[in-house]
Image (cartoon, rainbow, N blue to C red):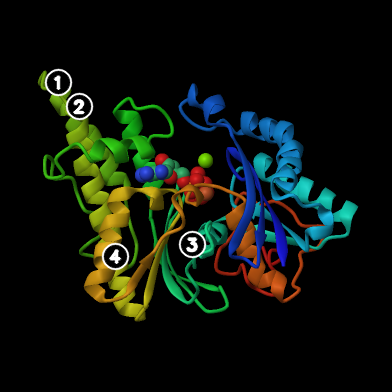
Amino acid sequence: MNILGIETSCDETSAAIVQDGTHLLAQVTASQIDLHARFGGVVPEVASRQHVVDITRVVEQVFRDANMTWSNIDAIAVTCGPGLLGSLLVGVSAAKGYALATGKPLVGVHHIAGHVAAAMLTLDGGTGATPPFLCLVVSGGHTELLSVDAKFRFTRLGGTRDDAAGEAYDKVARLLGLAYPGGPKVDDLAHRGRPDAFAFPRALLEDDSFDFSFSGLKSAVNNEIVKRKNRGQAVLVEDVCASFQAAVVEVLVEKTKRAAVHTGARTIVVAGGVAANRGLREAMSQLAKELSISAMFPPIELCTDNAAMIAAAAYPRAKQGRWSPLSLNAYAQLPLVDWQDENWPDVV
Ligand code: ATP
Ligand code: MG
Ligand code: FE
């Protein structure tokens, strides 16, 4: 079964064709990073307008790259939430238009289910993760610990009470004067600094919950920078990045460890943009070794937003012939746990 995926929830206009939920045949992504960089973050109205400009040529290009036509496509998957409403609407409207014009069935996909499904994809014919598994989602807007069952349904174990992990990376990058998006830059600099240079806080480790909190860490980094500047001391950016990353990774790994023990998981999956982080990948692989289980990550290029993950997430539903109506809407906020529900997303 070949699924055309469409993703426009934030600042990437992406289309992909995925075979049987696991094999990426082609993907085209128009990134708006340069457009938003001068504002230091994504400007929603600018983003939705650019999606309108790019969506048609991106979809047409993915068909050319895959050497396919609509006759090769079995279903259309589109992100219908959560995300920027104006941006989501462009993808949802395009997908509905294509569905109406071609008669192909439609599947509305939860963006975070997509990030999780990225770990099930392979680029080179290898094998990706197969549910059930424990999943840590660490993205720009989410930090969630989820138990994913064999039918790709989710149970939420915990999540952030304030900032998401990626958000913390981007805010710290901004404090250090690094250009948007700062996560990958902090990752690079961290590898050249001392992780024990500063004792930044590890929030909620004493708490039994599987919840996280990153806003205090961001404030601690800010306080340290201000204190040093006031004293006329140099701020070694590499040391700040390394110490910040050590604090984030320690908390993510420790909570994931507890959740793995609690659920008896045999596989840990780390997904979302921050899953591209080298320090986190190394630490999670080490944890898996310690627990004698396996750790799996999406291919690096499929950690941040892309359409392949949306097509992959739609596959378990599509296989059962559970389609979304042409009245499918876009939702800025959308609960995750219900997403495999019979009437999803009409339940919201
Ligand atoms: P959400 O998926 O929650 O709606 P989003 O789509 O904006 O949010 P993603 O595209 O999944 O987020 O991920 C982007 C985030 O990942 C940004 O915060 C970015 O800084 C972070 N990120 C990307 N690469 C790295 C890296 N190597 N190290 C740390 N953070 C990274
Ligand atoms: Mg993005
Ligand atoms: Fe995302």
Q: In the image, residue 218 lies at what x, y percent?
A: 29, 40
Count of numbered circles on the image:
4
Q: Distance between the residues labelled 1 and 2?
A: 6 Å
For disc 4, the marked residue is: 255
For disc 3, the marked residue is: 119
Mark positioned earlier in the residue sequence (3 or 1)? 3
Relative to 214, does residue 268 appear above or below in the rendering? below
Q: How far apart are marks 4 and 3 (CA)?
A: 20 Å
Q: Distance between the residues labelled 2 and 4?
A: 30 Å
* Disc assigned to residue 230: 1
Proximity of marks 1 and 2: CB atoms separated by less than 8 Å: yes
- Give the quarter of the figure containing the C terminus: bottom right
Q: What residue type is labelled 3?
A: Ala
Q: Residue at x 11, y 18 (%)?
A: 232
Judged by depth in the image, the label closer to the viewer, 3 or 1, is 3
Other residues around mark 3 within 10 Å, as few (<14) / some (14–19) / many (≥20): many
Q: Which amino acid does label 2 sit on?
A: Val
Mark positioned earlier in the residue sequence (4 or 3)? 3
For disc 2, the marked residue is: 226
